[in-house]
Image: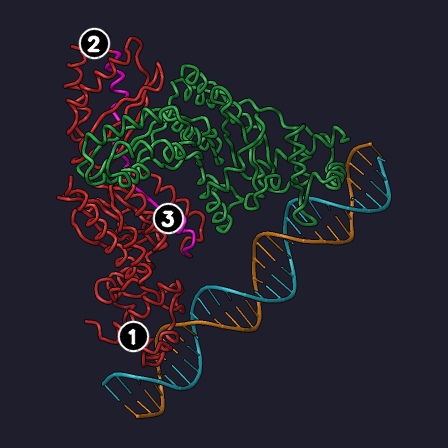
Chain colours: A green, B red, C cyan, D orange
Amino acid sequence: MLTDRQLLILKVIVDEFVDTAQPIGSRNIAKKDQVGFSPATIRNEMADLEELGFLQKTHSSSGRMPSEKGYRFYVDHLMDPLKLTKDEIKRINKYFSHKMIELERVMESSANILSELTQYMTLVLGPEIFETKLKQVQIVPLNQHSAIAILVTDTGHVEHRSFVIPKGLDQSDLEKTVNILNEKLVGVPLVYLDRMIKKEIRGLIKQYTSDYSQAYQMLEEALLIDLPTNLYVSGKGNMLNQPEFNDIEKIKILFSMMESEERIAPLLKSKEEGTHIFIGRENKIEALNDLSLITSTYTIGEDQVGTIALLGPTRMDYAKAVAMLQLWSKQMSHSLKSWYDEN
Amino acid sequence: MLTDRQLLILKVIVDEFVDTAQPIGSRNIAKKDQVGFSPATIRNEMADLEELGFLQKTHSSSGRMPSEKGYRFYVDHLMDPLKLTKDEIKRINKYFSHKMIELERVMESSANILSELTQYMTLVLGPEIFETKLKQVQIVPLNQHSAIAILVTDTGHVEHRSFVIPKGLDQSDLEKTVNILNEKLVGVPLVYLDRMIKKEIRGLIKQYTSDYSQAYQMLEEALLIDLPTNLYVSGKGNMLNQPEFNDIEKIKILFSMMESEERIAPLLKSKEEGTHIFIGRENKIEALNDLSLITSTYTIGEDQVGTIALLGPTRMDYAKAVAMLQLWSKQMSHSLKSWYDEN
DNA sequence: TGTTAGCACTCTTTTCATTCGAGTGCTAAT
DNA sequence: ATTAGCACTCGAATGAAAAGAGTGCTAACA
């Protein structure tokens, strides 16, 4: 449908615009040595490409820049799969060279490092916790009146919460309680914890202690933890360097958007595995309509799937971002799998 | 030294400038009903105040704004001690109405709430951890090869780190190790932990296990935790609303400054207790030279002292910020003390 | 003698016209 | 089919003019 020459010109425009953030004129394209045509010819082609919707102008006599459709075509057909620099590969491999144990630290530091490598924002979403099970409950008394409950999951997550010890319960009561809890709750998926506590434990407490309501309230306080943070965002500051964010208002909108886990998480909960690119309005959140999102899934053992994503201006270096993200998620899956298999 | 009229005018200018962020002209001052003089009179007084260094102009025919010396005089002599609104007091008291147990959650949420209440940035620095002692060590095996070490301090802080179990150590070895660790390390101040491990524990390990070096390496991996985060920063986003930060470059500098704990912490480590105000260049960090910092100390029991601070533009509402900070740190000290006393 | 009205003056901000330059689109020549 | 040439468009930069906010000074006033 598009001629070779049109393809070439489109590619040059995207590459150049990604680099400079400035609309590109026919003269500048003609100067490239890959291109052997005069500005006039290029102008004709550009007019056609614009008519087809791949390019757009900022005003009637400006150079052209890619439209969303243009970027879409570029990532689908034109982009050369970029090889990362040796240095980048080395850096990534180094990170994965030591053993991964705690999923959360992996997610957090992945977000940090990828942000730094790409200079975009990184979002890392953990797997659905349906599968995550309680590994152990412990209670550490701090003094007569207060104690800390510690819950460890099979993914290595540690959650803790302090609570007030009801009057009348002594050390041995606590120990007994912990034993009961471990007996009943270990192996229970986190999402069922509250149900289990309300059903099973409630009854047991009644049997063992006289002071039922206080003890039960304590347990609710101590055990009904929020589900672990599942989303890590890093590199917000990088956006300040992007020319499309030289406007404070835009930054405010973006930053406040990023505060809200509920609004971001749905973006990353992709149904399909693999790498996906959402350009501009292809992602459904209005505040992100002039940004692009690249997501890539990673797996932990069986079919626990998480998502790692880069968010940048639509004018982003898709080739590099994709390469980076794919290598990262592959390595991350691999690394987590080897740990999971031993489990 | 200053006449009453000059004091009045200075006060009006500071109050007004804090509100509007615009230089104030003589006509606008004259309009205030507290002021019964004509613009001309006020102009004369302003000229004097400028000569004395309390006011400054942005250009030769602009209105006046307070200089740093002006702010200093204002906070020292003019500012009326602001009564917080009922709503604010209610909000603060509500926060402190329930029991405080974990110092870190208190610090973190204090930072968040104060940022929201004041619309400035909040910095909360914990007490020096010299005093903080280890309360308990636990090891939770996740699978054959990895486990999580959990350390609980007497301040309710929970630190955890995952590590790889050396081959040859089994469940009972781990249990024995934990027992030894608890016997030897409970009550040891965190800052001495590494020394203790290197001295005492090293020897013990040698006695008990054949595979000395591996086991010891494991312990180092598991126990040599970083000291707990001691600084919480909140409300960076608020600065985006301040007119003095309508420049992206300034924001970049401020934000990157705030990334570095090492650069901020010294600001807050005041020698003296109580509330202190640092206006503009009075604080020694150049990046913060057009900001003001208000610090207030809080105590935990005996003489463990932490600092809570507000950071805003020099044009900040000192009266309100001071009132807020003082009430907060008082309540916080009170609340933490009652917990500490039981300890 | 302290206060104020009046007015010239200063400097910024806004507006408007002009120019400049990068780029386009079209036409005619190659 | 390609390209040189040229008129045209529009934004950005420049500069002059006007508006507006405010000052400083002088002279009048109570």
Tell me which label, 3 or 1, sits earlier in the chain: 1
> Is residue B230 one of those drawn in magenta?
yes
Q: Residues within 10 Å of mark 2 (few under 14, many from 20)?
A: some
Residues tagged 3 and 1 counted as in contact (Cβ below 8 A): no
Which image quadrant for residue B226? top left
Do discs 1 and 2 belong to a common subunit? yes
Q: Chain of mark 1?
A: B
**Mark 2: secondary structure:** loop
Judged left or right of residue B166, residue B207 is left
Q: Quadrant of the N terminus of chain A?
A: top right
What's the distance in space between the residues labelled 3 and 2, CA to CA? Answer: 51 Å
> Is residue B99 one of those drawn in magenta?
no
Return the x and y of residue A244 as percentages of the image width and height.
54, 44
- Front position among marks 3 and 1: 3
Amino acid type at image mark 2: Thr
- Front position among marks 1 and 2: 2
Amino acid type at image mark 3: Gly
Q: Is residue B262 visible?
A: no
**Mark 3: secondary structure:** loop
Determine the residue positioned at 15% across, 39% down: B343
What's the distance in space between the residues labelled 1 and 2, CA to CA? Answer: 84 Å
Residue with the mark numbered 3: B235
Which image quadrant for residue B187? top left
Residue with the mark numbered 2: B209
Q: Chain of mark 3?
A: B
